[in-house]
Image (cartoon, rainbow, N blue to C red):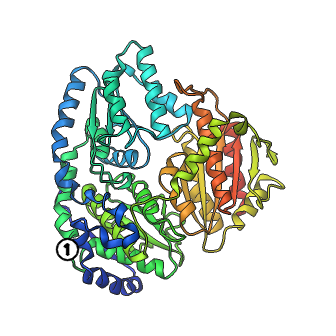
Amino acid sequence: MTTGEKTGVEIVDAALAERAAPLAERLVADQAASKLAAQDATLWGPDAESEASIRLSWTTLHKSSRPLIGEIEALRTELRSEGVDRVVLAGMGGSSLAPEVITATDGVALTVLDTTDPGQVADALAGDLERTVIVVSSKSGGTVETDSHRRIFAKAFADAGIDAARRIVVVTDPGSPFQELSEKEGYRKVFLADPHVGGRYSALTAFGLVPAGLAGADVARLLDQAASVAEQLAADSAENPAVKLAAAWAAAHEAGAEKVVLADTGSGIKGFPDWAEQLIAESTGKQGTGLLPVAVEGPEAAGFADAGDDATATAVGSPQGAAKIAVTGSLGAQFLLWEFATALAGRLIGINPFDQPDVEAAKKAARALLDDPEKLKGGETASNVDGAVEIFGSDGVSTEGSLTDVLRAFFASAPDAGYIAVQAYLDRLDDASTSLLRAEIAKRTGKQTTFGWGPRFLHSTGQYHKGGHQNGVFLQLTGAVGQDLDVPDRPYTLGQLQHAQALGDGQVLAEHGRPVLRLHLTDRAAGLAAVVRAVQEVGA
């Protein structure tokens, strides 16, 4: 997409446009857009002010990130002169989702590690290490997934006779423990990101630009695209596309449509709904309210084509099918537009869009399991077994009968206006067909259905699951590990970490009173085939 492509929001549904108009006028009267552009931390009320005051630098990144361009290009040139042209990214949440969208849209290769699945990490290690640089992105360095990846790759480089320090590039916040560690270890380059930007708003910081730029994406053009719409997004006008989008979402939410179904309709941007999913869910899903994004396969997909009163079908691209809203523009422009709209929607809904109060709970539960290996092993007697599938349920979840019986009862337990969340703690490359379950379940149950790869979704929709509307039911998929990977200098393997993350999140959801059904695939291929058959039989 070109820098000058028109950026806009069209509210296709006339009734929604009518309901959104007074909310847009309220934002205009409050001068919310211009105050947001000026980084006014008072927009979300006194309770949010302290957090907002250190989270608003993203509004000017199209200017402040410019000096990074030369640094990125210089390092890329150096690396390529040494025969290093394969880029692996270890990052979670905003640190991986934005670079993945940027590189996919530009058509350049980037290996993204936002997983603890041993098979997927082993596949990344099996690439040509002689040609590999790993970018490790973490604001503090304490993110357990990225720390594990760093340790595993450092050992792999050393075992291959490669100077590991010369192949590790770091993106972190200034003054962080990770900066200190990186300088002590002598890593190749440490890029310092703007500390006043939260992870989900970090697409145009070093977290988004460094891995994408090293992989060969045109990140200067990305900043140009964002700059081209910055003035428009700061305008106190009902025609401001961010104001229109925020007002439409908030108006729909007021009317009971707390879900935003996202489909690409030929925008040319690859994977944008996955990035927007994290932004919207983590920003708005708290205090028992918020907007649940549902990323679907296209405008004809179940959940979008048949969206009910509880959902707002939003197109990324031209208005097609059942779209009630359509958003157009280049990738850099859309990054900034959706960030502005999400922050403004937070004001209208009445939440702080910059905190994530419920994310830490699942991390704590996983750490507790890792600290007590016996506890991790305990409680693992399946309630039921159907072929290659072991069945576990939280209190109140029926596990009796065939796998089809169990799934039928579980799906029926979701409220009429609720949702079903599929959480797959598997290999998102080798087990990629698992994602087909989203559409199958949505089609057969008629309920909005989300899909997330674990632990990736814990840094995305995980906040909404605990803090948003409490009307979800949660289907976890875990699988047997064929060949595990040790995490150097840590008392656990990747497989154990992945298992602890699944059990820890399930435990926290159950403590919130949410139904959790876990299906453990003792043989991944056979187990997955059995689950798909059972889902199809549910609606037969």
Judge whether 250 appears above or below 539 on screen: below
Return the residue nearer the eye: 364 or 500: 364
Amino acid type, mark 1 = Ala
Query: Where, quadrant-wise, is the C terminus in this rendering?
Result: bottom right
Judge whether 487 appears above or below 465 on screen: above
The 10 Å Cα crowd at callout 1, few under 14, some 14 to 19, many 20 or more, is: many
Residue located 69% across and 50% down the image: 518
Judge whether 146 appears above or below 106 on screen: above
Residue furthest to the right = 401
- The quarter holding residue 516 reads bottom right
Residue located 81% across and 53% down the image: 402
In the image, residue 360 lies at what x, y percent?
Answer: 52, 51
Q: Mark 1: which secondary structure?
A: loop
Left or right: 148 in relation to 384: left
Residue designated by label 1: 235
Residue furthest to the top = 161
In the image, residue 158 lies at what x, y percent?
Answer: 41, 16
In the image, residue 131 lies at what x, y percent?
Answer: 33, 22
In the image, residue 515 lies at what x, y percent?
Answer: 69, 60
Q: How many marks?
A: 1
| Residue 9 visible in the current orientation | no
Query: Where, quadrant-wise, is the N terminus in this rendering?
Result: bottom left
| Residue 24 visible in the current orientation | yes
Residue located 18% across and 46% down the image: 220
Return the residue nearer the eye: 178 or 304: 178
Judge whether 344 appears above or below 147 on screen: below
